[in-house]
Image (cartoon, rainbow, N blue to C red):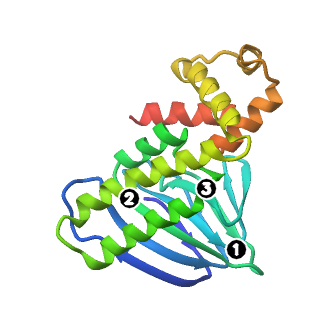
Amino acid sequence: MADLDCTAIRREELHRFPPGDGPDLPFTIATIERAGSFHVRRSRRPHTSSLALVTAGRGWFACGGAETILRPGSVYASSLGSPMEVRCDPHDPMTVRQLMVQGEAFPRLLERELGARDGAWPVGNPGECLRLYDLLRDEAREARPLAGRVAAALAQALVLTVRRGLDCGPGASGSRNTFLRARALLEPATAAPPPLTAVAARLRITTMHLNRVFRRHAGLPPAAWLRERRLDLAAA
């Protein structure tokens, strides 16, 4: 069972979708104001994933030893089975818009489009993302016919919009491309990966830069990311 610890939630607005048309539908859209911490510990059971947009305040996202500053316009993705923590500045409470989806299809979508199931990144188009959160909230609140199917399409559009935001930020495209190329070299050889020095040399970057790129886009250094992939493959 996953162990959740949510503290100091000052305000929470939740809208749940009615039972839907498939196993992988958005089931909660939320606006949450936090002034404390949110912890998720590892579970190997089917899980709930979330994709959150910070709209106010300041905080930190920690995953696999890497920590990313959260500001308005930051997005973070998390799977309920992953060891991660979100902390908020008590003097600057953080407000997030959060989509929570049950099932395995959504984390696979996050990994395919964003490069990781867990991580935090600044996006260059937070306004576009916020509009999609608003549409999801309206669908859940009004519970009109086919709301679940519309929401599933909106959730996919949200992930693609976040991806576009990652690619349009200053300097983001080159860093993201480096990450995707490095992942393509490491993933097929998860059981016996090449040395990181060899991967960095092939990409014509330093191992330090390779570590920075993985921490930025996967939330983990390369060695920890490989360890997570091996665990996931073993669980599958």
Question: Would you say the residues marked 2 and 3 are in contact, meaning their CB atoms lie under 8 Å apart?
Answer: no
Q: Which residue is at a point 42% across and 36% down the rendered structure image?
A: 235
Of labels 2 and 1, the one closer to you: 1
Which is more N-terminal, label 3 or label 1? Answer: 1
Res 7 → quadrant: bottom right
Query: What type is the residue that disc 2 sits on?
Result: Val
Residue at 29 percent across and 70 percent down: it is 17
**Can the viewer see residue 16 in this picture?**
no
In this rendering, is residue 211 above or below 99?
A: above
- Residue ranking furthest to the bottom: 10
Residue type at mark 3?
Met
- Quadrant of the image containing the C terminus: top left
Label 3's element?
strand
Q: Position of residue 122 (x, y in %)?
A: 67, 54
- How far across and how far down the image is residue 10, in percent? 59, 85
Give the image quarter of residue 68.
Answer: bottom right
Q: Which residue is mark 3?
A: 84
Categorize mark 1 by other alpha carbons within 10 Å: few (<14), some (14-19), many (20+).
many
Neighbour tally class for label 3: few under 14, some 14-19, many 20 plus, Cα within 10 Å: many
Residue 106 versus residue 208 in the image, above or below: below
Q: Is residue 227 above or below residue 9?
A: above
Which disc, if any, is residue 231? none
Coordinates of residue 162 in the picture (x, y in percent):
53, 51
Residue annotated with mark 1: 57
Q: CA distance from mark 2 to mark 3?
A: 17 Å
